[in-house]
Image (tube, grey):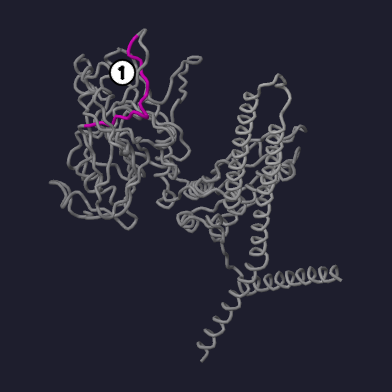
Amino acid sequence: MKQKIRSAYSAGILVLLAILFVTLTIISSVFLKGMRFDLTENSLYTLNEGTRNILGNMDEPVNLYLYFSEDVSRDLPQFRSYARWAGEMLEEFAEQSGGKLKLQRIDPTPFSPEEDQAAQYGLQGVPVGTAGDTLYFGLVGTNSLDGMEVMPFLQPDKEKFLEYDLAKIVFSLSHPQQKKVGLISGLDMKAGFDPATQSVSEAWIIHQQLSQLFDLQDIPIDTGALPDGLDLLVLVHPKDLSESMLYQIDQYVLRGGRLLAFVDPLAEADLGGDPNDPMARMNAGGSSTLEPLLQAWGVGFDTDRVIGDYAYALQVSIGQGQPPVRHLGILSVNQDGINSSDVASADLNTVNLSSTGWLSHTGTDGSVFEPILESSQNAAPIDAARLRFLSNPQDLSSDFQPTGDRYALAARVNGQVNTAFEQPPEGMPLMGHLTGSTETGINVVLFADTDVLTDRLWVQKQSFLGQTVANSFADNGTLVFNLADQLLGSSDLIGVRTRASTTRPFDRVEALKLSAESRFRDTEQRLQAELEETERTLTEMQGLRQDNELTVLTSEQQDEVQRFVDRKLQIRSELRQVQHDLSRDIEALGMRLKFINIVFVPLLIVISALVFRHMRRRRREKEQA
């Protein structure tokens, strides 16, 4: 009889679930058609507002081809789960583009034309299993002008960057024109003749790669006017800028122009004066700033002091046979000091700086200040003059007292700001003068160091077959190129940040496990304490005996041992009960989640749909009345 009741109960549950499923399907297809709900905690299927703007303002149609080896990945659940999420995100891209973005999924099965095509596009194939199968998981994007962008392999450990990478590809293909970058530098970054060494000097690696990546235009520091049509302006050690040039930079930024600037309280690469003068080289290093622009942007900068840092100080050699010492003024900022929420810096490990200053937010209304690089809490300002004539780096540590604060070494500045000039300087036209930024606000990235760009802090050069090969040992160049690339995108692309991971831990289950482990460990410790106490008691009993049969236990000792054995069995039973309670709690949690997912959520959606339908019917009746 009980078996029949149980069977009827199970059948009733199945019928109820079937009715809910059919009802939900009908309602979603009829009343909720076209509506999308993202109920995930981290909004995994909701695109960033900047991404939606990029997709809604595409100038050129784009085709995306997602290559994924379905059969080869059958034993790789991590890749299959990530590929499913990536595909759903791309479908959302296509949905938001209004038909300008076409997505095609391709399965490059072994020895097929699709596999050959994937290899021709440069997609990376990963050997899988013992059979030698190759897994492809990459993306190819094209436009109507033969432009092409390729992501050779979509790595699951970089999933938080996926939306930005996809948005960047779409933006690049839908806006294929070449970007124009202007560079104004107070340092000699270009190739030329070095009078001091009587040899040809190579261009800085930063300058070489910027020239390769963009349409780079070197602008003399004493130029009278900014060129038209600049997509990005880069300032390096902008000392001795004229008032008219500062005004033009001010107006350029207020109009929405992108700026990447490097100022410095002590630019070690700045020889200053006559390069043939030995004293000029000995006293190398000068300061630069962008006042009064920084003040208008809500940024403070000290040109007389640099940052010393115990935690990030690099070891340097002070002489042959001498052990290396830590130099508080030469910093190697690790991941703890690198902004992990900014796309341009989130995946970096080390950025090296030397005699760097710091930036602060002065609280100007409208400006938003976001650090990209920060010092540790073991940092403090040091007079720049001490580093200029420093002979022994150990001298910096003698009276160094960390303040406990973290100092911004590089920062992003956005938002609404006012001009630094009430009126144009003499000789500049009044027409077109802006008193404040446009609706999009300003997009500025500032570094308090110029030495971060020098080769010595991030690349090692070697000669190979007559060619100079540069191998990076720090991420200075990557950070600069990422920032330039990001600033050259639209303001929407700049706003796209890293998103949460699709992999979510079972926090409640982990909490239950931790609680059980704590109880288990306490019980074990109690058992161990009782064991040690029993051994101590037995030893004392044995020491008090006067007979010669020390190997034979007395009745009292036997009772003590039996008492401990019984207690040990009892404690083991308690340990098993702890494990049983843990399994029971996890199972109960699972049952509650199943009820919510299978019954409560569908029922809630059905009720919501019925309420929505009722409200729409009432609104229609009112309109007809």
Q: Nearer the viewer, residue 45 or 606?
A: 606
Left or right: residue 468 compared with residue 535: left
Amino acid type shown at disc 1: Phe
Which type of secondary structure does the marked residue at label 1 adopt?
strand
- Asked if the magenta segment contains residue 315, the reply would be yes
Left or right: residue 148 compared with residue 119: left
Residue placed furthest toward the bottom:
625
Which image quarter is the N terminus in? bottom right
Magenta stretch in the rendered image: 305-319
Left or right: residue 73 compared with residue 225: right
Residue at (21% x, 39% y) in the render: 224
Residue at (36% x, 39% y) in the render: 181
Residue 573 place in picture, x, y as percent = 70, 45
Query: Magenta: predominant secondary structure element?
Result: strand
Residue placed furthest toward the front:
546
Residue 601 place in picture, x, y as percent = 62, 67
Residue placed furthest toward the left:
426
Q: Nearer the viewer, residue 349 or 475?
A: 349
For the question of whether residue 109 can be seen, the reply is yes
Residue indicated by mark 1: 193
Residue 118 place in picture, x, y as percent = 66, 39
Q: Nearer the viewer, residue 212 or 384?
A: 384
Left or right: residue 139 compared with residue 376: right
> Quarter-wise, where is residue 134 in the image?
top right
Examine the rendered structure and indicate whether residue 383 appears above or below residue 117: above
- Asked if the magenta segment contains residue 85, the reply would be no
**Mark 1 surroundings: few (<14), some (14-19) or many (≥20) residues within 10 A:** few
Residue 329 place in picture, x, y as percent = 30, 26
> Quarter-wise, where is residue 188 in the image?
top left
